[in-house]
Image (cartoon, rainbow, N blue to C red):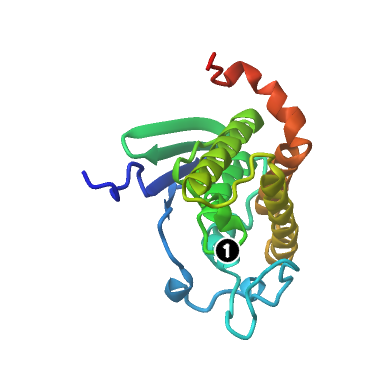
Amino acid sequence: MSSEAFFFMPVIAYKLSLENAEPLTFTVDTERLSTEENTISPPFWTTLSHHQCPNCPLAASAERHCPAAVDIEHIVDTFCHVDSHAEVQVDVQIGDRQHSKRTDVQTALQSLLGLTLATSACPVLSQMKGPGRLHMPFATVEETLFRMVGAYFVGQYLKSQQGQTADFTLDSLSRMYAEVQTVNRYLKLRLDDAVSRDANTNAVVSLMSVAMLVSFSLDQQLSELQPFAIQTDV
């Protein structure tokens, strides 16, 4: 196997089964470049200039639509009339592994939207594409913190090995999460204009809450992960 071979499954499938309805399957290709060319007439709320994030580096003159909004448009449209607390059976297929959970639509969408957004072409959210490739459905805050900090330290180690300046103080990670929070806030503004029920918007609010919990005092939270750390005598 070459060093460039993928050791993860690039396509992740979510099957959501609502009561008295046909199962809905959403596949997320973590290596996709863009979905805009496959979307016919994206809705108004996906236009880049519509509630464009203040930290967005894209120019409305060059990009017609927000890449993150276009990526989730089909999910938003599907659940635009579904209440957030409706029960749903969720089955997630990742290679030969399957994760199953009976939960509410809000929790299901939080996991599905989180994966879709992290692997989108959004210049800010795509910074989380690495952990997205090793997606963990319905992860707890502690699991998310451990994965994100671990992925961050791997990235900084590789930078140091390449002679670049590495940051092991978590300052860069904190700044990234602040940027992510901004994107989540403005994405919610888009969804407020797009949907008539609360499942999608509540899912984004949940993502905002998780990002806030992870970013709030990272040093303090890391100390709470000590039982899960590898500690050597060397």
Q: Is residue 64 visible?
A: yes
The residue at which mark 1 appears reads as 122
- Given residues 115 and 179, the one toward you in this image is 179
227 in relation to 62, above or below? above
Q: Is residue 104 visible?
A: no
Placement of the N terminus among the 4 image quadrants: top left
- Given residues 134 and 169, the one toward you in this image is 169
- Given residues 167 and 80, the one toward you in this image is 167
234 in relation to 17, above or below? above
Residue 172 is left or right of residue 63, and the answer is right
Q: Residue 114: x and y, percent?
A: 58, 48
Please give the name of the residue rendered at 40% of the width and 57% of the height, measured from the top-left corner. 31
What amino acid type should be assigned to the residue bearing mark 1? Cys
191 in relation to 204, above or below? below
User: Which residue is the extreme one toward the front?
Assistant: 163
Q: Residue 176: x and y, percent?
A: 67, 52
Q: Residue 144: x and y, percent?
A: 60, 35
Please give the name of the residue rendered at 59% of the width and 30% of the height, measured from the top-left corner. 143
- Kind of element beneath mark 1: loop
Q: Residue 115: x and y, percent?
A: 53, 48
Please give the name of the residue rendered at 68% of the width and 41% of the height, measured from the top-left corner. 170
Q: Within 10 Å of the Cα at label 1, are there few (<14), some (14-19), or many (20+) other Cα atoms?
A: many
